[in-house]
Amino acid sequence: MTRTLRNALLGNALLGAAFGLALAAGPAGAATIKVGVVAPFSGPFGVVGKSFKEAIEVYQAEHGKTVGNDTVEFIYKDLDQANPAQSKALSQELIVKEKVSFLAGYFFTPDALAVAPLIDEANIPCVIFNAATSAITEKSPRYVRTSFTLWQNTVPLAEHMAKQGIKKAISAVSDYGPGIDGEAAFKTTFEKNGGTVVDTIRMPLKSTDFAPFMQRIKDSGAEAVYAFLPAGPTTLAFAKAFNDTGLKAAGIKFFGPGDLTQEPDLPALGDAVMGITTTFNYSRAHDSAMNKAFVAKHKEMFGSYDSVTFTSVGAYDGTHVIYQMIKNSGGKIDGAKAVESVKGMSWESPRGPLTIDPDSRHVTQTIYLRTVEMVDGRLENVEKQSFPKQPDYGYKLAK
Ligand code: PHB
């Protein structure tokens, strides 16, 4: 779309939104600063929205709902599946009608990508709590991301697999942004370390029948499979098919980023993932005082910590970044300046130490190698090794 046309469609409404924002400040100088969160709150990926909302509420319970004189209010919009047009419509509604100063959330890559023109037009920071394709933050200077990228998790995993003496592997990924990044990161790194990727399988994002892909894996002669699918019913079905079609029994080793073994799915996955090795930025079983307090606070506030997983820390740390941007702005938020003010910011998270890389605006963090084990009667991702200060290896990589 041309800039002129986009301006005609959005510009007036967004200018109006910015004007409304200025008026939101009350006479005493106290204002309500609104944050719009777009995520799945219903449907098969509903646990994502729940984990975002709970983590935000934990953060606000610990740090208060005010920054200076201003109250921070979160407004939630349900986007139940990857749907960029609907993501854009909901985000525009948040900007124009709700007059939010920040956008946040976004589970699926296409939904995060769809808001680039909006956030630039309205000069609003967008803090991505999950969507993990490297190229996203290249599309607008107003994106900041507190999750992970597929490159970030996959490089240490591929190196580990090569070190295990695995020579022939196959990649199987969902056919969209993060899957394609995962495949590229895996192939490049595994082959640089002496391995061969015998085949690369791309599966439609909406696949539910994985039997044909399992046959292809079996026929490939690979000793090991690297797999990425978005965490949820997709990973659950894939891991079950891996077991049910006899690949596990045939001795093929199963690896992937930790999306495969997200905590809320572990009880249903059970035997299918016992002993599987993954790399990821967060495990609910991470052994630190801060993480223990984080998990305990969920239990205290919501009666259980069953939904605590990687999306929880994405949202918790994202909320921390938003609070910091509000603090730095002295209550008068200019989106571009707010993003500028958190470049290079470092802090301690329940997952470990984090820094916002000033160039990629993505978090540099420790990636952990984990295996699924039974701990006190619950399946957990038990950390075995850590790889500190991992950047987004996929940022500005020639694609
Ligand atoms: C994404 O669409 O970027 C995405 C979704 C789910 C994941 C990871 C990445 O588990």
Image (cartoon, rainbow, N blue to C red):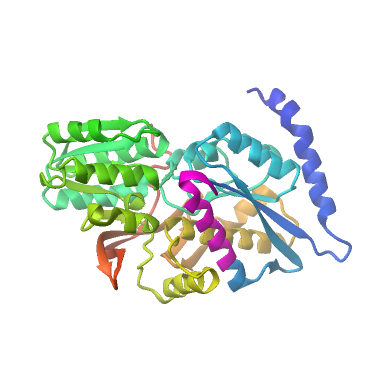
Residue closest to the eye, 91 or 296 = 296
| Number of numbered discs overlaid on the protein picture | 0
- Percent position (x, y) of residue 102? 66, 50
Q: Nearer the viewer, residue 357 or 78?
A: 78
Q: Main secondary structure of the magenta part?
A: helix
Is 270 above or below relative to 8? below
Residue 136 spot, x, y in % from top left: 49, 40
Q: Residue at x 11, y 49 (%)?
A: 165
Instruction: Report whether 159 appears left or right of 131.
Output: left
| In this rendering, position of residue 201 left or right of residue 208 | left
Figure quadrant of residue 223: top left
Q: Is residue 101 visible?
A: yes
Q: Which residue is at a point 39% across and 57% down the rendered structure image?
A: 264
Residue ranking furthest to the right: 27
- Judge whether residue 359 can be spotted in this image: no
Q: Position of residue 116 (x, y in %)?
A: 59, 37
How far across and how far down the image is residue 302, in percent? Answer: 53, 68
Q: Quadrant of ligand 1?
A: top left
Name which residue lies at 11% across and 47% down: 251
Residue 369 versus residue 337: which sits nearer the camera?
369
Which quadrant, please, contains the N terminus?
A: top right
Left or right of 98 in this view: 351: left
User: Does 197 appear in magenta?
Assistant: no
Q: Is residue 154 left or right of residue 297?
A: left
Span of residues in magenta: 41-58
**Placement of the C terminus among the 4 image quadrants:** top left
Using the image, determine if residue 162 lies above or below residue 270. above
* Residue name at image x 55 percent, y 55 percent: 343
